Amino acid sequence: MKAPVRVAVTGAAGQIGYSLLFRIAAGEMLGKDQPVILQMLEVPFEKAQAALKGVMMELEDCAFPLLAGMVGTDDPEVAFKDADYALLVGAMPRGPGMERKDLLLKNAEIFTVQGKALNKVASRNVKVLVVGNPANTNAYIAMKSAPDLPARNFTAMLRLDHNRALSQLATKAAVPVADIRKLVVWGNHSPTMYPDYRFATVDGASLKDKINDADWNANTFIPTVGKRGAAIIEARGLSSAASAANAAIDHMRDWALGSNGEWVTMGVPSDGSYGIPEGVIYGFPVVTKDGDYTLVKDVPVDEFSRAAMDKTLAELEEERSGVAHLL
Ligand code: NAX
């Protein structure tokens, strides 16, 4: 058996946390041979800490063979101590009457504190996934607040958007979801994201040719994927939780264990590719191997795609300028 690794999860008593922690402890994220120590962070309020205790009791009651230890805390420096992986799920939700700008600033405070704590106490190669919204900008803030850690280790979750797109495409083309390759969702985790299947294949053949419906792409597919989060809230009365936790598992598993040469979408700091300014956390196609990722660089960009990629970039740049004075 391997030595245990430390996995920090914030917002551990929330909805996504409840779907996520049990799967991590069951070995679904890092493999069935990888023991984990869960280090869970919640806000200091009595109710949240009590709920966290309850979650920890349930984790105990699962008697997971791979769960080598647990820590529950309200102190980021305890939660992130020597963490090898950090899943930053907890964030300030948008309250009634709250402007988007206020939401950005509230979250900027949280992710500045957490970035600094990671910088101070986490493993020097900690892999960070930000789920809490606005995910890309929160990841950017954490990255900027952690100058001693590799910037490329700060990522944002676009995998839920990627998985949503896969599912819509599989249904439209009547093909198994697992057979679709080379899909990407560019940009921000927000309704401006651009799901792009121009180069997707099924059994080596073009999925775009098979679907052959530009109107469906522009007027049904792209808006359906972009507004899926809102549609789930409308239907369920609560935001996506199990599917979000599933996407977080997919993201981290592929990053840690590799994607076997396949494209996956990760929000990562741009290296300047595709005209996206360096450092902006943007959804790109990547291939993962041996605990690292490589940006796929040679995807042709046509006029339609350029406009879509620039639109989602403009939103990210606006978010970034809204928090620039804090960094
Ligand atoms: P919940 O409100 O159920 O849980 C969030 C938990 O985080 C709460 O228990 C809260 O006390 C805790 N928390 C808040 N601030 C914290 C802090 N500074 N430190 C530690 N814990 C803190 O929300 P949930 O449904 O679990 O969603 C969590 C976040 O994921 C939200 O920001 C949500 O918008 C975002 N999402 C992101 C998605 C993505 O694809 N990137 C999709 C799903 C989800 O909407």
Image (cartoon, rainbow, N blue to C red):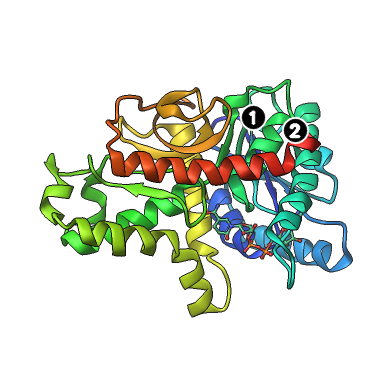
> Is 1 left, or right, of 162 in this rendering?
right
> Is 300 left, or right, of 326 in this rendering?
left
Foreground of the two, 218 or 175? 218
Quadrant of picture, ligand 1: bottom right
Identity of the amino acid at label 1? Val
Disc 1 from disc 2: Cα separation: 8 Å
Q: What residue is shown with label 2?
A: 118
Please say if 190 is above or below 138: below
Q: Secondary structure at mark 2?
A: helix
Foreground of the two, 178 or 188? 188
Q: Which residue appears at 63% of the width and 34% of the height?
A: 5
Mark 1–mark 2 contact, CB under 8 Å?
yes
Please say if 33 is above or below 207: above
What is the quadrant of residue 299 in the picture? top left
Specify few, some or many for label 2: CA neighbours under 10 Å numbering under 14, 14-19, or 20 or more.
many
Q: What residue is shown with label 1?
A: 126
Residue 138: percent from the left, percent from the top? 66, 44
Identity of the amino acid at label 2? Leu
